[in-house]
């Protein structure tokens, strides 16, 4: 396991005393030189800063498989700096930055730029996602190999926001990424069935007179894609699964041995289309909020492993894109700073999952999907010290104006949620302490542009 | 009642009060001087993001008959077409001292946004939003039906509901704000509604609505109906595979001369034919039907002014309390509101 050498900015050693490791028995974790130096009971501080962690849960640093950082191009919505601050506060140590920036991340140059911005920020590991097609246009494959070989070492490719709807392009992408162990993350949305779509098509859309986004538009693409993945023997990841029917198709595909993984967002685990009755565009998102029976099916699927991971689909927007008519409003919600709490609320406090499962769906498996070798690791001696400390007993009321993200479009505003991130360690450095931002991790000054791919 | 946004959340008491007030306003329209001083010094803005000369002039006439100052703000050719947001437009109108905003918008829910935000404090009247609702159209339709129903029964209109009246609403329900507003209001007033449409022009979820659904116009007529309301078929639907051809639509779902004769043959001598206008003669309604004595098309236009006067008067006169519903009306409402949800 490669970890980078510490420089002077990343000071000190930390002894986390008495944290419930993955919610289990209380033990100490000694963090030094970027790694977990020791794990055990009654460890000596030995000059390390002691963090009393009785009552807290220690988790592997969370890894978001689906984040929109907006830079380059929409720095009025979010920057890599602000988005990764939000990520650290939310308990994350790695995020996958989606490709729908401007310019689109469809060349080695753009993914390297995002990668560099992420390292300069130093709050989390920023893993750029490469576009599948040039300009997200769905017509011509982007230089996937060049992005894979770049300093950003891209492994996840997605036109997220837009579906790779052409079956031939999708087939070719799935086949091609096998050359470098990549994965295609599909935004499953049949475009013709969703022209002008504004919300879930069902009882509520009928009353509100908003153009419907039918579940079948998601399910038909997933059905096609799992069959394509099987046919060409490749790896498929399904972004933000939102319907009960999609869950059934993915369950069937996994039973057939198809190499598919799936993601659900926190908001689809909690919110339903009933909220759209307010016509408040803070609830406008793509895929749309569905019905309560979909929510229940998604929770059950996350608990039983049919859905592998939680991805935030963090999508900040400037306020003018939400302070308008519903049909004019941008789609998307912020999520990095509320994900842990929403998952605790919907999955742990309901008894569907424990903290070990939480670590699996928010860290271990997303890191594996993205091929992020030094993330999502066990909390054991010798492992990289990417660690999140959570106070599960805390209760807080969501106030978007106090968030680190530039986006104020949180659908959870005003809700009381459980669970609070107390500390986040990224490469052994506390990016968050006492629930507040601390300082970023500083890469060694001479970590060169030609950083070796040795860690992978 | 601070705003008039939809009929879905309009109580029976408020519906009856608007209709009864409209009866009083109608009397003003019969006088030589068609004007009341009720809203003198108040400013009503007609904020139209979508062309609708009929609705705009109806609201304008209503406001002027109440002596209000009227400002017509058409989005086309204004700052709105240069990219000004609804928020800025609303705040501009607020700064100018608008007391009421009558808003027509192509986006469903736009009036709700005006009412729910702090952009403007004025009373908001929905004059048609996207494919959502058009409450004053439903109220003028109900007013027209109530007069017809009362005359048939030899009773006064005032205070009455529409209990027992059978109403068929035929056409493009999917895209119709008129159909939605009528379904909710007619349910509240106790009428029995049947929607008649090709399956492609009914929304998914229509099964939860408080009405029946039929794909067969002739069968609906044969079962007996007291009012048939034909909806306009928009031009842009015609090339989007909602139905094969306009002729097939007209044959199956239009109110043509054969169906006009069928009303006579079925003994439905008192059945009225309604249309919110503008009509596509020869498509959803034949000229003979539109011009027949059964047609209430022009009465609807006339009643529209009275109903809009009533709405403006009630929202701006300061009496926004919820009226006590009459016992009979309350009972009939209860029978039809079992699956209401907000």
Image (cartoon, coloured by chain):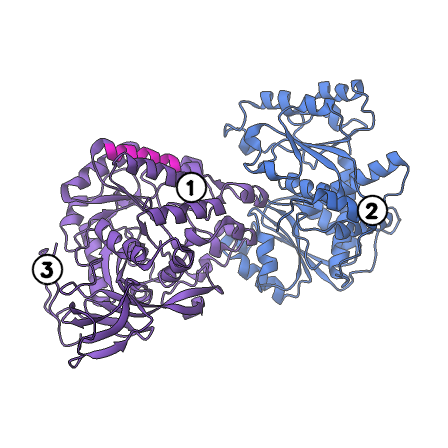
The lab-note entry on whether marks 2 and 3 share a chain reads: no
Question: If the image is split into quadrants, where does the N terminus of chain A sit?
Answer: bottom left
The residues colored magenta run A219-230
Q: CA distance from mark 1 to mark 2?
A: 45 Å
Q: What chain letter is assigned to the residue under label 1?
A: A
Tell me where residue A254 appears, x and y as whole percent: 29, 38
- Colour given to chain B in the rendered image: blue
User: What's the magenta bit mostly, secondary-structure-wise?
Assistant: helix
Residue A222 visible in image: no
| Point 49% across, 50% down: residue | A272
Tag 2 near tag 3, CB within 8 Å: no
Q: What chain letter is assigned to the residue under label 2?
A: B
Q: What chain letter is assigned to the residue under label 3?
A: A
Residue bearing mark 1? A244
Q: Which chain is purple?
A: A
**Residue B46 vs residue B130: left or right?**
right
């Amino acid at each position: 396991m490669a970890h980078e050498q510490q420089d002077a900015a990343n000071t000190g050693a930390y002894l986390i005393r008495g944290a419930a490791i993955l919610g289990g028995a209380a033990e100490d974790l000694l963090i030094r030189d970027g790694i977990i130096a020791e794990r055990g009971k009654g460890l000596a501080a030995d000059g390390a800063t002691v963090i009393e962690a009785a009552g807290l849960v220690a988790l592997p640093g969370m890894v978001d498989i689906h984040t929109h950082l907006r830079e380059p191009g929409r720095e009025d919505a979010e920057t890599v700096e602000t988005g990764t601050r939000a990520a650290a506060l939310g308990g994350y140590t790695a995020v996958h930055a989606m490709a729908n920036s401007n310019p689109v991340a469809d060349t080695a140059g753009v993914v390297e730029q995002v990668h560099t911005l992420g390292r300069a920020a130093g709050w989390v590991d920023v893993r750029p996602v490469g576009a599948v097609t040039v300009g997200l246009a769905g017509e011509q494959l982007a230089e996937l190999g060049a992005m894979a070989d770049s300093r950003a070492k891209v492994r996840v490719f997605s036109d997220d926001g837009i579906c790779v709807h052409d079956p031939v392009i999708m087939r070719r992408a799935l086949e091609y990424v096998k050359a470098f162990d990549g994965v295609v993350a599909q935004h499953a949305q049949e475009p013709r069935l969703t022209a002008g779509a504004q919300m879930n098509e069902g009882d509520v859309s009928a009353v509100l007179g908003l153009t419907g986004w039918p579940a079948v538009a998601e399910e038909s693409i997933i059905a096609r894609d799992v069959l394509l993945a099987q046919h060409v023997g490749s790896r498929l990841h399904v972004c933000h699964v939102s319907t009960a029917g999609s869950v059934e198709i993915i369950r069937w595909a996994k039973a057939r041995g198809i190499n598919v993984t799936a993601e659900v967002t926190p908001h689809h685990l909690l919110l339903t289309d009933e909220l759209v009755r307010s016509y408040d565009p803070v609830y406008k998102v793509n895929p749309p909020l569905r019905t309560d029976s979909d929510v229940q099916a998604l929770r059950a699927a996350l608990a039983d492993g049919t859905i592998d991971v939680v991805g935030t689909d963090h999508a900040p927007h400037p306020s003018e894109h939400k302070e308008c008519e519903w049909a004019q409003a941008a789609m998307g919600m912020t999520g990095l700073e509320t994900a842990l709490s929403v998952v605790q609320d919907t999955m742990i406090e309901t008894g569907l999952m424990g903290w070990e499962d939480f670590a699996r769906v928010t860290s271990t498996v997303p890191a594996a999907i993205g091929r992020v070798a030094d993330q999502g690791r066990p909390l054991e001696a010798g492992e990289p010290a990417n660690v999140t400390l959570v106070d599960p007993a805390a209760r807080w009321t969501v106030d978007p104006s106090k968030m680190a993200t530039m986006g104020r479009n949180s659908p959870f505003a005003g809700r009381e949620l459980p669970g609070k991130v107390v500390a986040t360690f990224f490469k052994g450095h506390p990016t968050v302490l006492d629930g507040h931002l601390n300082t970023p991790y500083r890469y060694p000054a001479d970590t060169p542009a030609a950083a070796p791919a040795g860690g992978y | 009642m601070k705003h008039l946004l939809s009929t879905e959340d309009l109580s029976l008491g408020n519906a009856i009060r608007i209709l009864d007030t409209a009866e009083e306003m109608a009397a003003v329209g019969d006088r030589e001087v068609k004007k009341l001083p009720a809203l003198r010094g108040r400013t009503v803005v007609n904020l139209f993001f979508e062309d609708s000369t009929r609705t705009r002039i109806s609201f304008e006439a209503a406001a002027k008959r109440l002596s209000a100052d009227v400002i017509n703000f058409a989005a086309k050719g204004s700052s709105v077409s240069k990219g000004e947001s609804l928020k800025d437009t609303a705040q501009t109108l607020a700064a100018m001292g608008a007391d009421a905003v009558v808003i027509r918008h192509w986006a469903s829910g736009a009036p709700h946004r005006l009412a729910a935000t702090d952009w403007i404090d004025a009373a908001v009247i929905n004059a048609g939003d996207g494919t959502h609702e058009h409450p004053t159209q439903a109220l003028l339709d109900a007013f027209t039906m109530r007069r017809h129903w009362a005359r048939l029964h030899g009773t006064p209109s005032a205070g009455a509901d529409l209990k027992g009246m059978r109403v068929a609403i035929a056409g493009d329900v999917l895209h119709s704000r008129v159909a939605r507003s009528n379904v909710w209001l007619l349910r509240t007033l106790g009428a029995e509604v049947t929607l008649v449409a090709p399956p492609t022009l009914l929304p998914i979820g229509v099964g939860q609505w408080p009405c029946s659904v039929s794909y067969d116009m002739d069968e609906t007529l044969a079962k007996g109906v007291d009012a048939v309301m034909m909806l306009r078929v928009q031009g842009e639907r015609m090339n989007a595979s909602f139905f094969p051809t306009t002729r097939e639509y007209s044959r199956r779902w239009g109110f043509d001369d054969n169906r006009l004769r069928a009303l006579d043959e079925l003994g439905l001598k008192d059945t009225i034919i309604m249309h919110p206008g503008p009509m596509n003669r020869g498509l959803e309604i034949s000229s003979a039907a539109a011009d027949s004595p059964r047609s209430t098309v022009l009465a609807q236009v006339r009643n529209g002014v009275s109903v809009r006067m009533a709405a403006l008067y009630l929202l701006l006169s300061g009496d926004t309390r919820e009226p006590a519903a009459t016992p009979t009306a309350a009972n009939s409402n209860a029978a039809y509101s079992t699956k209401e949800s907000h």
